[in-house]
Amino acid sequence: MAKPSQSSFRRILLARILLLTVPVLLIGEAVTFRKARSSLLETARWNLTESAVNKGENISNAIAALKSNLLLASQTTVIRTGSPAQAREFLQQLASTLPNTQCLQVTEIGTGNLVASTCGNTPIASAKADPAWQQQQNQEIVPLIRVQPLVEIDGRRSLQLSASLDPQRSLGQLQLVLSAPVYNSSGRLTYSLNVLSALHKRERDRPGLLAGSTVVIDRNGTILAHPMANRIGRNVAQEPDAGQLQHLLKNAIAGRTRQDFIHLSFDRNGPDLLAGYNVIPSPIDRANGYWLILAVTRLDHALYGLQEIKVILVVLTIGLLVATLIAALHIIRDLARPLEKLRDYALNLQSHHAAERVPHNFKVREVEQLAEALEEMLGRLNASAAELETAWQEAQTSNQMKSEFLANTSHELRTPLNAIIGCIRLVRDGCCDDRTEELEFLARADEAAIHLLGIINDLLDIARIEAGKLSVVTEALDLRQVLREAIDLQKVQIQQKGLQLIATEWQEPLLVHADAAKLKQVLINVIGNAVKFTDRGSISIKLEITAQPVQDGSTTFWVTVAVEDTGLGIDPAQQHKLFRPFAMVDGTTTRKLGGTGLGLAISRNLIELMGGRIALSSPGIGLGTTVEISLPLVDPLPSPPSLETQLSERSHSTSDSNFDLNEQRALLEDDLRERIIEESKRLDSISSVKSIKVEENINGSGVTCL
């Protein structure tokens, strides 16, 4: 009986499959997500690094172009000797041609007065002359250009732009002031041509864009450009990621200009930033200075595509979970259904009459083997049950037959006992008229005693057989002689019933290994039964030789004695009972033929002890019976019979016979003479004592003997 706490096979299997597949699926999805994130980060880092390289190159190229254009402009006649109005007009034209130019000014050296300006009256550069400018005019071009960021080296802002400058326009950009000396016609330094330029465009940092915002830091750690304008001019030591930024600056100062990427955070609670960086020579101090160029973007902007990947992975995970569940249910059904079929079949066997065959043709080999084992086990159980049922039925039948046997035997035993007691008491009490009558009663008591002894012997024989204590002593003997003696003992009864005897006689001996007395007992019993149950017709006794092959390839010969009668016959449904002890077709105490039902059972056991076989067959009631007794021959096959005799002896005729007529006639005359004398004496005694009635009470029951 299943317990409530026990789980079904399907549930256990489903739990195991999900326990194995779901974690693996989730781990796989997590690994895929991390791999996608790593790939996006890697892509963003390399793109930002490439962007930083490009930004550095663009800044360097822009500064070089501005220097060239500014040097050429400083050597024009309009700037060198022209009027302020002409200079202003020239500056306006120059501002329109130079890219990223916010302001152009011509400043007088020493006084700082503005000669011409495109952006108001506030100077954008210092009025002090660069020491290199005092050199000759034919000096190299590049060193004559002074480059200054729009932040003061001393730490305070130097922006004092006029209101004409748009501060939003240059917000967060790298603003440089380039100054070129202007010499007059005599070669004296008189003016400086200054230009304020924003060297890069301010990029909008949007999700998915990996160009990044530009951050420029000089070798001293001063932030020259930053997307947040309030950070321009500050030192990196004041930033949250000061250590990492200072480490990068040290590498730049040491000349290790390796391109790499870093994680930053300019605010303590701000978003995480991803930056690629590059190092370029400083345009201010090319000999010893470097600028650190950063391309910075927010981490979530760099991982913008990860959100879509996450959604796809979530949908894919849900789909895979559903598919896994469906596949698991399908697999579980395929695995559990065969076991459930076997379970249902086993439970249905409680009816004990299941006609269906054990389910087969399973795809799983182990389950198919289990079904075959179950079928074999059921076959053995059914065979055992059939044997038990047969044994039970046999026990029931045996009990019934024993009950019938006891009832019949009590009658068979009481009848001769009553006769013996009655006859002896008649003699004892002097009820006989003469000595002859006394001898007659004593003779009847003797016959009854002999009959009673035969019944007791049968009981003892069957008891010894069932106890396994009955034994036979076999020897080589001639079957013809034993059969002839058994027939001779039954001739008188055959003649009295007027039956025809047909017997087969062989010329050569039929040697068999048998116990002569026991074999004779069997033959007498079989022939006696044939005589007893045949009222008219014939009794045929035949001998037949048959050859039977054995396992070693040789052949053995058997002799069969067949006793066939034309008597009552036996119902085929009852024939299997006749070789059982106490078995009788008619077991009532009122049957007219008598008998205990032990003869055939004793005969079968005796024949089997001698290595033979006995069988009984009958077509049906009223069609006669045939009993065959087979024993193996000792000698080779004898010659076939040369003479078949038929003996027909009836009480009202003396027909010819193939037996020895003189011998048969003498036997018949002696037998008839004795029976006529006995019958006449019996009639005389009955008529003389017919009025005498003796009643005795033996053990509380009345016994009457006439």
Image: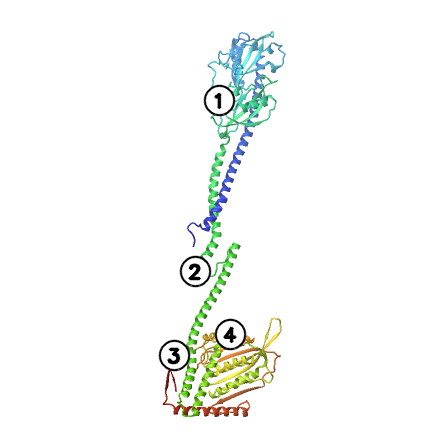
CA distance separating discs 4 and 1: 122 Å
CA distance separating discs 3 and 1: 139 Å
Pick whichever of labels 3 and 1 is earlier in the sequence.
1
Mark sitting on residue 393: none
Pick whichever of labels 3 and 4 is earlier in the sequence.
4
Instruction: Mark 2: give few (<14), some (14-19) or many (20+) Cα within 10 Å.
Output: few
Q: Secondary structure at mark 1?
A: loop
Name the spot of residue 503 as percent of width and height, x first: 53, 85
Q: Secondary structure at mark 3?
A: loop
Question: In this image, 418 relative to 553: left or right?
Answer: left
CA distance separating discs 3 and 4: 32 Å
> Which residue type carries mark 3?
Asn
CA distance separating discs 3 and 2: 54 Å
Judged by depth in the image, the label closer to the viewer, 3 or 1, is 3
Instruction: Mark 3: give few (<14), some (14-19) or many (20+) Cα within 10 Å.
Output: few
List the residue tagged with mark 3: 699
Mark 4 touches mark 1? (CB < 8 Å): no
Pick whichever of labels 3 and 2 is earlier in the sequence.
2
User: Which residue occupies the foreground of this view, 436 or 143?
Assistant: 436
Mark sitting on residue 350: 2
User: Which residue occupies the foreground of this view, 276 or 462?
Assistant: 462
> Which residue type carries mark 2?
Gln
